[in-house]
Amino acid sequence: MWNIARVMRVLSGKSILLIVAGGIAAYKSLELVRRLKDRGALVRCVLTEAGARFVTPLSLAALSGEKVHQDLFSLTDEVEMGHIRLAREADLVVVAPATADLMARMQAGMANDLASAILLATRAPILLAPSMNTAMWEHAATQANLKSLRQRGCKTVGPQDGDLACGEVGAGRLAELSDILAAIDDGFSAGPLKGLRALVTSGPTHEPIDPVRFIANRSSGKQGHAIAAALAGAGAKVTLVSGPVSIPDPAGMCVVHVETAEQMLAACQKSLPADIAVCAAAVADWKVKTPAGQKLKKAKGAAVPSLELATNPDILATLSGLKKERPRLVVGFAAETQNISAHAKAKLEAKGADWILANDVSEGSGTFGGDSNQVHLITRSGIETWPRMSKSHVAQELAERVARAFKKGKKA
Ligand SMILES: Cc1cc2nc3c(=O)[nH]c(=O)nc-3n(C[C@H](O)[C@H](O)[C@H](O)COP(=O)(O)O)c2cc1C
């Protein structure tokens, strides 16, 4: 694993801009500043107007050893260290606590105070540590804002469940400082796939029959999403193209939601160039040739409608066969119910992929929708059979194999 404690080394000489917003947990930012300083980071603090109701600029200045910035229109600040310079010089911007209001302003692209202006102007990675009352946290507006911020690449840590200052018990408590520090360390860890772009497909596709019915399959997206998260954790810049699933978007990557195989292919093509492509989605082989424009009606005595199917585009074969912009490593999945490795080997050849991960999806295997998977990795140099393990473990193993292959400069 590459994300494990590099604490002292990772933060030495790094510039962290800590934005303290107006939440009840703002007092915890004081300890966060101290811990970041202990790790060798240069910490500059920005305090929102509401944040200053909870902690004083004097405390933050004393602990950080730096001037605390509060006013977008301050004459002296703008001359000495303008908001654009603050935004530009940060290696990482941390918002702790991140209030519901500040996240809403970020989502809307507002720049009406120093904190939001910096968050809009910075090109540095952003880590949000939200904290608020449970109802505020669970509100559809907050969740939608958060989803959109994550899609734009903001990382988040917490909140966690627990006793809240308002007397309620539930989600909304600021993440433990140790978790915030670990997320900050992750933000700086180089990762073996740093500088590489990965495209991952995940989930099923839905092929419409009429406006209300569709052909689908049992894929949950758990394996594909775990692979996207593992590649991002290893430092790759990931685009996840997901069919309709009921699991949350992984943080720290661009997620594109699609429904049909054709939309999935178009989204994949749009996200190229990529160094790595992992096609984990269960793409429908067939679609209804001409979906009905109106809902098909069950009229008394009428004939049962028959569906004429047409072949869907083959995303794995298309990406593998690209002349221009072919990803350097194309990995496919083969969901098999019998003769698993033989069928997967044939698929490797037929599709022109570099690797195939073959899994057993036969009845009783528990693979579709379950949390574990048993796979065979088929490469041009042979077959490896991995023991049954959790889907996130499979994802980590695959990410490590990918990292090794890129280190060697070859595909298998
Ligand atoms: C006592 C008190 C506690 C608050 N705690 C929180 C909180 O924990 N999280 C939050 O999102 N908002 C909280 N708020 C509301 C914010 O302070 C308010 O939305 C403010 O506009 C946030 O401004 P800022 O995002 O610029 O810091 C609290 C307000 C009060 C009066």
Image (cartoon, rainbow, N blue to C red):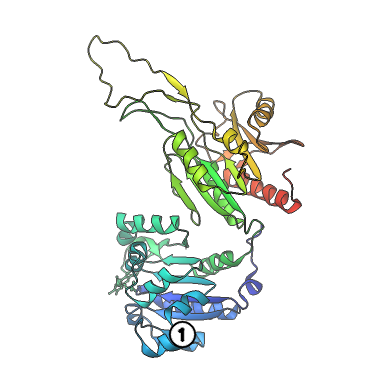
Q: Establish if 265 lies above or below 400.
A: above
Amino acid type, callout 1: Met
**Numbered marks: total:** 1
Other-residue count near label 1 (Cα within 10 Å), few / some / many at <14 / 14–19 / ≥20:
few
Measured from the top left, where is residue 71 in percent x and y?
36, 83
Please state the horizontal and vertical placement of residue 180, each as a whole percent of the image: 51, 68
Mark 1 Cβ and ligand 1 under 8 Å apart: no
Q: Quadrant of residue 83?
A: bottom left
Please tell me whether residue 180 is drawn above or below residue 1 in the rendered image: below
Q: Which residue is drawn at 59% across and 76% down?
A: 14
The residue nearer to you, when weighing 68 against 294, is 294
Q: Is residue 221 at least partly visible in the picture?
A: yes
Residue found at the far front of this picture: 324
User: 37 or 307, which lies in front?
Assistant: 307
Can you give x and y, in whole percent of width and height, for residue 202 in the image?
51, 41
Across and down, in percent, residue 395 comes to: 61, 46
Q: Quarter of the image containing the N terminus? A: bottom right
| Residue on which the image places disc 1 | 81
- Direction from residue 166 to residue 264 in the image, left or right: right
Quarter containing ligand 1? bottom left
Closer to the camera, 200 or 350? Answer: 350
Q: Can residue 375 be seen in this view?
A: no
Residue 406 vs residue 13, the one in the foreground: 406
User: In the displayed structure, would residue 374 be above or below residue 18?
Assistant: above
Is 139 placed left or right of 123 in the picture? left
Q: Quadrant of residue 56?
A: bottom left
Mark 1 residue element: helix
Horizontal side of 97 relative to 296 (left or right) equals right
Q: The C terminus lies in which quarter of the figure?
A: top right
